[in-house]
Amino acid sequence: MSAKYWIAQYVADVFRNEPRNVGVFVSTKDGVAAKFVGESDENPMDGRRLRAFAHPAVYRQWVEFWRDEVKNKQLESLPESSAVNFRVTEGGTVEDTGSDSADAVAAYLFSTLVSNGGLEEALQSAESMAEHKANLYEEIASVLTQMRLLGVENAAAPVPHPVLKEQAVTGRLLAEYKPSFSQQNGALYVMETVDFTGNRRKTSRDHAAWAAYMFQDVRSAPRQMQVNPLAIIKVTEEDKTSEDVRTGLALLQNESAVVNWLRTDEREQFLEDRRRVAFDTHSSSSPAA
């Protein structure tokens, strides 16, 4: 069974346009559910947890409105009700939820995308994330450099369409992202590295959640070319015994193609695809690359 979900966001400064995830909505074939910042089992809305909002009373009113929409099962129309400071965006679909209830899926997504230890923390801890992904990122960059496929934006490149490091791309909500790598030739290839090996598996899961969100947002932005998201990961069968790793993998697989750098065949195919796109004189938007 699968579940469709939406994300409630708060934008404190509309000029900086830095949305903060504050809730999730979930719809399954068996029902709907939602969970928001400030709610707990003991207290429907704990005012002590609303200090991040400039106007907590306004946030409470939005939660009441959203709750009414959930009660009426009007989730599909939620994005249309978005305002300047409070909005709802489409999140995507979670596959293989088994017999989990809508409430259980909402709790899982909330912990991943909203609460401490989830996407919010990952976004606020860019330095920690950068440190975590450094080894795999640098390894791939080194190989691409040796292949003379790595270029610099606006510089004379040895190839027509080089792979670029950490170049800004925009999402549907005009948020700016800097994926590990990108490449453009007929289609825009957005690539992020996620290392599931080692002991920092919650950090890996949070990084994967951020990457999946970026892929979804960039792909849904209006532009003249197709966007092909690609997650380049390191993961072993032993790593997959971790629930955090399985969760991270599921999020990535739902939003992108996935290449395991530890698998020789997948690594070589990825590098061959980068070479082909770099030199292809016939612009192609094939998702295979």
Image (cartoon, rainbow, N blue to C red):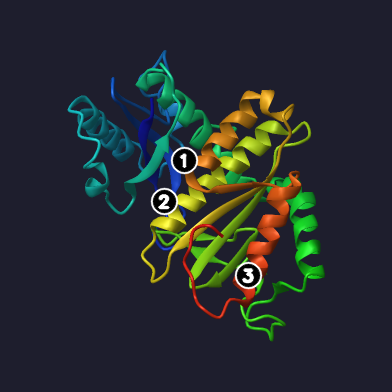
Q: Secondary structure at mark 2?
A: loop
Residues at circles 2 and 1 in contact by the CB criterion of under 8 Å: yes
Between 119 and 186, the residue placed more toward the observer is 186
Label 1 is placed on what type of residue?
A: Ala
Q: Residue furthest top?
A: 42
Count residues near mark 1 (Cα–Cα under 10 Å), then give few for <14, some for 14-19, many for 20+.
few
Q: Is residue 165 visible?
A: no
Residue 231: x and y, percent?
Answer: 60, 49
Q: Dot 2: few (<14), some (14–19), or many (≥20) neighbours within 10 Å?
A: some
As measured in the structure, the alpha-carbon distance from the residue carrying label 3 to the one carrying label 2 is 44 Å
The residue labelled by disc 2 is: 12
| Nearer the observer, 162 or 198 | 162
Q: Which residue is mark 1?
A: 52
What residue does disc 3 label? 276
In the depicted view, which residue is nearer to us: 285 or 90?
285
Q: Are marks 3 and 2 in contact (CB under 8 Å)?
A: no
